Amino acid sequence: MIELVRYCKQFFEGALTPALETTMTDAQRSGCPINLSLEVLGDKWSLLIIRDMMFGNRRHFRELLTKSEEGISSNILADRLKTLLEQGVITREDDPTHKQKGIYSLTEQGIELLPVLAQMAAWGYKYLPVTEELGIRARLLSEGGPKMWAEFMDELRESHLGAKRRRRSGPSVGERLQAAYESVVNGR
Amino acid sequence: MIELVRYCKQFFEGALTPALETTMTDAQRSGCPINLSLEVLGDKWSLLIIRDMMFGNRRHFRELLTKSEEGISSNILADRLKTLLEQGVITREDDPTHKQKGIYSLTEQGIELLPVLAQMAAWGYKYLPVTEELGIRARLLSEGGPKMWAEFMDELRESHLGAKRRRRSGPSVGERLQAAYESVVNGR
DNA sequence: CTAAACTGATTGCGAATTGCAACCGGTTGC
DNA sequence: GCAACCGGTTGCAATTCGCAATCAGTTTAG
């Protein structure tokens, strides 16, 4: 793995355009899919940002900053958003209603992180000291299984990618999760 | 969350025994299952160690250290093994054949990280520049689906927990994954 | 029209974490 | 008895993290 880095270095050194150099800064340790995923998402914040975008409908910088349960700081948030943008997990576009606001959206690649989050949530729910309010979504998603995940991903494709979705009867998965959360918060 | 930390600090400060201090170092940021999972596994190495224990049959310190595709350093490995032990993801016992060797095993909690790894591998395989050799396991696991995962987890329960497993016909999932990997390495 | 609040960030700085190499005492195999 | 191997530990430099303060431009309230 280190050999590979050395190889890349001697191969590219001095011959890179600045533009390429900035995109090649990530020296990958191996071509293993788990390792590559961890190099993109393997820290304490990236997946939390994705979580908030998926389940909390946070689409603006300030929303992600202040409505975060864990209290991310602004420089970390800015850095992670930049990385996720570069990796193609999210996109950013200007908000037409406010010249400074940006709207962050999940890409298809980002939406397909839902099963990862769902499995991670199920594991945490089973083995870690999860709060009742914050665990209810994990429980419902786990019970709903891959079928529910697929439905939720379809909803995300609608709200983040603008994809048309065939109409369903009854409340959406997102609405059901939110309602369940609120009913726990309000003491049932 | 920060308030909680401050509260704990003023509550415990100066009144902690050293023993309690070492076990209370982890100040959790929130009771969200995803966050709690990330506080245990949210770094670049922990899940790679689990991966090597699951798919590479690495059970000793030196095996994990030297046969790692990515080249983990010994202090990091020691630190992560300690954390995973404390969190109940793995266990350690003395190797009866060698007074210095320890045998690390996955607990049931650790074995149930397989779906997380499988989803992460599937995502990486789909979206990241995965090597053919190192991607073949991810492809087979993805195609095999939850049924194959469950079978593999049963095999892990046998090799790590000493659980009895009802006999199956044909090669095990572990053997099939290994054979597929080798056939790719040997140029088919 | 002006002041306050809000926008998405950036900067500075101390503290914690990481990565690397060297090293350690004890054990095993030859 | 001696080299190789065992699971780690230590020292140190470099990077990253977390926090608070700050910034320039934008919107809103009075």
Image (tube, coloured by chain):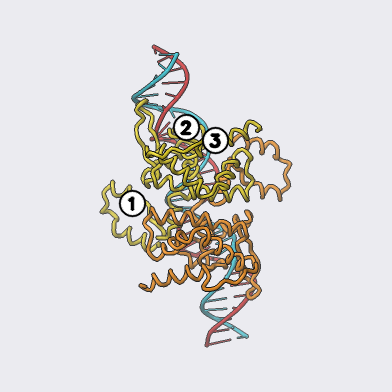
Chain colours: A orange, B yellow, C cyan, D red
- Which image quarter is the N terminus of chain A in? top right
Q: Gap between marks 3 and 1, in whole Å?
A: 41 Å
Mark 3 near mark 1, Cβ–Cβ under 8 Å?
no
Which residue matches tag 3?
Answer: B178
- Residue drawn where x is 54% and y is 67% of the image: A58
Mark 2 near mark 1, Cβ–Cβ under 8 Å?
no
Nearer the observer, B175 or D26: B175
Which residue matches tag 1?
Answer: B24
Do the residues at discs 3 and 1 belong to one chain?
A: yes
Do the residues at discs 2 and 1 belong to one chain?
A: yes
Chain on which label 2 sits? B
Vertical order, A97 against B68 (above or below)? below
Compared across the picture, whether A122 is left or right of B8 comes to right
Instruction: Indicate the amino acid at tag 1.
Output: Met
- Which image quarter is the C terminus of chain A in? bottom left
Do the residues at discs 3 and 2 belong to one chain?
A: yes
Instruction: Indicate the amino acid at tag 2.
Output: Glu
Query: Where on the picture, by quarter, is residue B61?
Result: top left
**Number of the label disc, if any, that sits on residue B63:** 2
Query: Where on the picture, by quarter, is residue B138?
Result: top right
Q: Residue A93: x percent and y percent?
A: 65, 66
